Image (tube, helix red, strand yellow):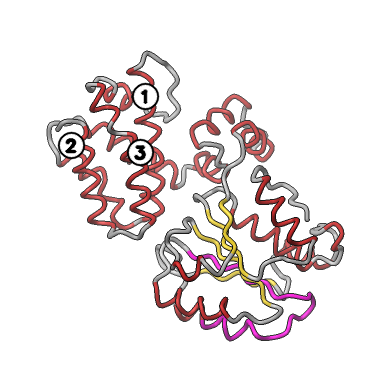
Amino acid sequence: MEFPGFLGNQEVKAALSAAYEGGRFPHALLLWGEAGCGKRTFARLLAQALVCRDQAHAPCGVCPSCVRAKAGTHPDIRVVEGSGATRSLTVEAVAQVTADAYRMPEEADVSVYILLLGSRTLEPAQNKLLKLIEEPPEHGVFFLVSPSAEQLLPTIRSRVQAFHLEPPSQEEAAAAVQAQRPDLSLERARELAALCGGNIGRMLEELEGGTSAQAFSIAQAMALAVTDPREEGLLLAAAPLQKDRELFREVLSRLGLIFRDACVLRAGGKAVLGGASQAADRLSALPRKQLMALPPLAEEYRQKLERNANMALLTTDLCVRLREAAGR
């Protein structure tokens, strides 16, 4: 099995290639990882390989099945996504998949379903999905795509093979983005790769001024407000997080970088990766013990976010903990 254009994750590629070549490819996979790391791209490549007519070089990219798979028109590959702000699957969407899953494939040997779970697929929908993967049709293959494994029921996690996808190396990411954007200098591409941890999706979004730009603005405002004597500034800056889980996740990632930069500056270093030099400089003036208490909070609240904590309460609690850590 080959993975043209998909960087990094060598262990995952090797494991799935071995399963494919040995005739042991699982009927249900969970692909999880942070937004922008290529989960959908990887799922589509796997689906293309499963319907490819050249099984010795799958996906070959040139057979009629591969051409249709790349164009999104192959009749045996279904991509199912939820609706609303979280894009999470609903009971109705899972019911439609279940009704369709027992039909015979039209061209390939299997029917592949790429299920984009969004940021919060609720328990009733997950329970319905569980029944499908517990008693799957013989020809059905299901790829569950999620930002986190923890958001899924333990019963689902126990019945799928889970693979965590990570961004490639920063150098690989910089080269890949520069290839897509020839107008971008290699130096700027490397700066973006450092800022986004090699996450190609986030790098491209940064260039387009999408969610990453909004997340940066919020994280910078929150970091500046941490040391403000007035508490309302931090609460106001964090207010947009209450209704957008993906944005919350991205802001926590940005805050972690800013806190890291502040620690580096406090230690006499100069490398600032988070891009918010003013906020990092202000935080670096905190007493060392208080400053060192900030970076773990970003990871702590990321884990709480993945456990589907109430967004409004989590936002308020984060603000309180940040101010307490900073001695405010």
Answer above or below: position of 241 versus 222: below
Is residue 59 rendered magenta in the image? no
Query: At x 41% / y 53%, what residue is drawn?
Result: 246
Highlighted magenta segment, given as a residue range: 95-117
> What mark, if any, has residue 217 been given in the picture?
3
Residue at image x 59%, y 31%? 189
Left or right relative to 205: residue 327: left
Q: Where is residue 30 in the image (x, y as percent from the top left)?
A: 57, 62
Q: Is residue 159 left or right of residue 209?
A: right
Label 2 sits on a secondary structure element that is: helix
Q: Which amino acid does label 2 sit on?
A: Glu
Residue that badge 2 annotates = 324
Q: Hey, which quadrant is residue 31 in on the image?
A: bottom right
- Counting from the top left corner in percent of width and height, residue 26 is at 67, 67
Q: How far is mark 1 from mark 2, CA to CA?
A: 22 Å
Query: Quick one: SS at disc 1?
Result: helix
Identify the residue at image location x=21%, y=50%: 316
* Nearer to us in this view, 11 or 109: 11
- Disc 1 crowd, CA 10 A, few/some/many (<14, 14-19, 20+): some
User: Of label 2 and label 3, which has the lower sequence position?
Assistant: 3
Q: In this view, does 253 lie above or below 114?
A: above
Label 1: which residue? 277
Q: Which amino acid does label 1 sit on?
A: Ser
Residue depicted at x 78% and y 76%: 109
Alpha carbon separation for disc pair 1 and 3 = 13 Å
Q: Where is residue 147 in the image (x, y as percent from the top left)?
A: 48, 56
Q: Please name which of the two marks, 1 or 3, marks the residue nearer to the observer.
A: 1
Residue 49, given in percent of the width and then of the height, sits at 76, 62
CA–CA distance between discs 2 and 3?
Answer: 22 Å
Front disc: 1 or 2: 2
Q: Nearer the viewer, mark 2 or mark 3?
A: 2
